[in-house]
Image (cartoon, coloured by chain):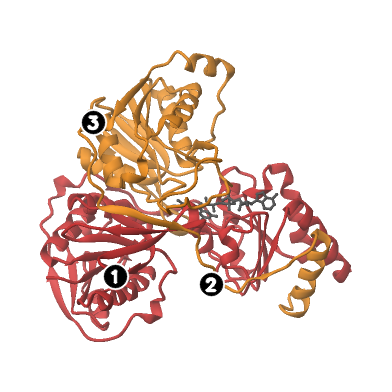
Amino acid sequence: MSGVLVVMEARGGAWNRMSFETLAAGQQLAAGLGVAARAAVVGSGVAGLARELAGYKLEKVYAVSHALLGEYTADGFAAAVEALVRRDGADVVLFPHTYQVRDFAPKVATRFGRVLVSDATGFRAEGGLVFVRQLFQGKLNADVRVSGDGPQFASIQAGAFRAESAEAGQAAVEEFAPELAAGTIRQKPEAPFRESARAVDLTAAEIIVSVGRGIKEKENIGVVEELAKALGAEMAASRPICDNGWLPMERQVGSSGQTVAPKVYVAVGISGAIQHLVGMKGSKTIVAINKDANAPIFEVADYGIVGDLFEVVPALVAEVRKVRG
Amino acid sequence: MKIIVAIKQVPVRDSQLKPEAGGRWIEEGDLSFEINEPDAYALEEALQLKEKHGGEVIALCLGPARASQTIREALAKGADRALHVEEEDTAGLDTLGVAALLAEAAKRESPDLILTGLQSDDLGYGQTGVVMAELLGLPHATIIMQVEAGEGKLRVKRELEDGWFQHVEMPLPAVLTIQSGINKLRYATLMGIKKAKTKEIKKLAAADLGGKRASAAVLEKVYAPQRTKQTQMIEGDAKTAAAKLVEKLRFEVRAI
Ligand SMILES: Cc1cc2nc3c(=O)[nH]c(=O)nc-3n(C[C@H](O)[C@H](O)[C@H](O)COP(=O)(O)OP(=O)(O)OC[C@H]3O[C@@H](n4cnc5c(N)ncnc54)[C@H](O)[C@@H]3O)c2cc1C
């Protein structure tokens, strides 16, 4: 059956919000291709989620359920989704680009002799199918043309489509219990955990000054800390800064750190990779200071200064002190 | 433990990147290259596992002739030997094509463990390791922040979103994709650099490894992204720009 199949993600009975962004993408792609959109939720005891999904404009909703899918495993999910895709016969299968999808979807695509076009930001249905995706952590874009019969696979980048634009409607739910054998699932997952209680709650900060690898050395962090002090702001950082232990992990902003939305977010020497952007692009005002005029951070910035942070930041500290006394 | 680490050579961070005239890839003429960052962490993890459990670390790289520089650096850091799948037209391969060649090269070594970085800084598909695992029929886990190797099995720490983690156990042999920051990178010593010169780099061609697959996903065009946001760019020298920004933060944003 031709069509676009969206594989949603949920954990512990709750949706991953990115699923609905992908649902919106799937509906739009289906409309562009002139085919139907369908969606699936995979897990154990997903009837409630499937009913919720049935309130969207879809041809059909699959409740893919099996006791062995209660906990995520790469082997279990790959087998279930492979079986689903074979049964459904979609031309295109879309996933949200989550950590879980990164873990199993390439495996599914490989079983069909296909490539998962991962982290796509858009698509065009013109004489075939072209996906748009970023290269070099957002510094360049690329068009990727997929070819060949059978399903094409892509995962959709966080924030590329708006969840609110998913169209409501009515769909029938179809239950699907894939054949899975415990012996074929080689990963034995333990319960998810958090490293430690978060001592710093960045979400309460009015102003955040965030430092990235442009700072070059641990010894230079003080340059940016001065600015945070002058502004009465909390310090945050991109991942490499925390990986290096220059600032504690709990100050990391991004997909694997905290998500913040302060009144002002000042990004200093941060390039603006998507994994950082997802954690801060909801900020009311974003200021970027970067020596590279083409840095992707300027794509989300309200105010930008192209310059050397070692000149700009001290100058900024002096100016702030002037007005703050 | 016999460990294969797949490493890739990419343009150095902060390179000024320009699409080439035909738009199929970037202009490489003026660029310098280095090891893909997550791959450096994968290599370090392999070296640490070898130090703990003994065995051998083999660097595996698919790339053009220039990648031999990156391979030498891996040998200087402590890899025992290397396999170089020499391929000039890497843009003509899709991730399945790359992973198929890497998997075939790895298979011949019957490793206990295969490590890759979790994604490349250039293409960023983030799936070479996963596809290799599938082609080799091996279990895998991705975005790994810790590896404990036991008798015939592994226990790894997977990174999940929002600061969550999870331990996962699986049998060996297996494939892991390593996250940046899992360990502290070492520098090559002078001794290491000297030794590297005598270490073996075995060259392989795609033809030796079952040949190249036709691409199912073709990089058709590379271009600069279009800016959609209206960013107010603040001009002037540092002092002037700083003064202007503070004024905006005071009167437009009302934050100071
Ligand atoms: C699964 C996964 C999860 C991740 N999670 C996160 C996360 O939670 N948070 C996160 O931040 N990242 C995360 N990352 C990493 C992310 O992809 C980027 O690698 C990272 O955000 C880059 O950090 P950066 O911008 O500080 O460094 P870089 O990308 O190296 O950028 C440094 C910037 O500094 C500029 N610069 C250099 N010198 C100067 C100077 N003198 N003055 C001014 N500017 C200068 C450069 O132009 C450049 O733009 C994750 C990656 C993966 C794959």
The hue of chain A in the figure is red
- Chain B colour in the picture: orange
Whether callout 3 and callout 1 share a subunit is answered no
Which sits in the foreground, A8 or A134? A134
The crowding category of the residue bearing disc 1, from other C-alpha atoms within 10 Å (few below 14, some 14 to 19, many at least 20), is some
Q: Mark 3 lies on which chain?
A: B
Give the camera-side residue of B41 and B207. Answer: B207
Please name the residue that numbered disc 2 is placed on.
B228
Q: Quadrant of residue A81?
A: bottom left
Measure how far apart labels 2 and 3 are at the Cα level. Answer: 45 Å
Chain of the residue on which disc 1 is drawn: A
Name the kind of residue labelled 3 in the image: Ala
* Chain at tag 2: B
Q: Which residue is at 12% across, 51% downward?
A: A181
Query: In the image, residue A217 lies at what x, y percent?
Result: 68, 42
**Mark drawn on residue B207:** 3
Q: Which residue is drawn at 47% across and 47% down?
A: B121
**Which quadrant is the C terminus of chain A positioned in?**
bottom right
Q: Is residue A149 above or below residue A59?
A: above
Seen in the image, is B208 located left or right of residue A2? right
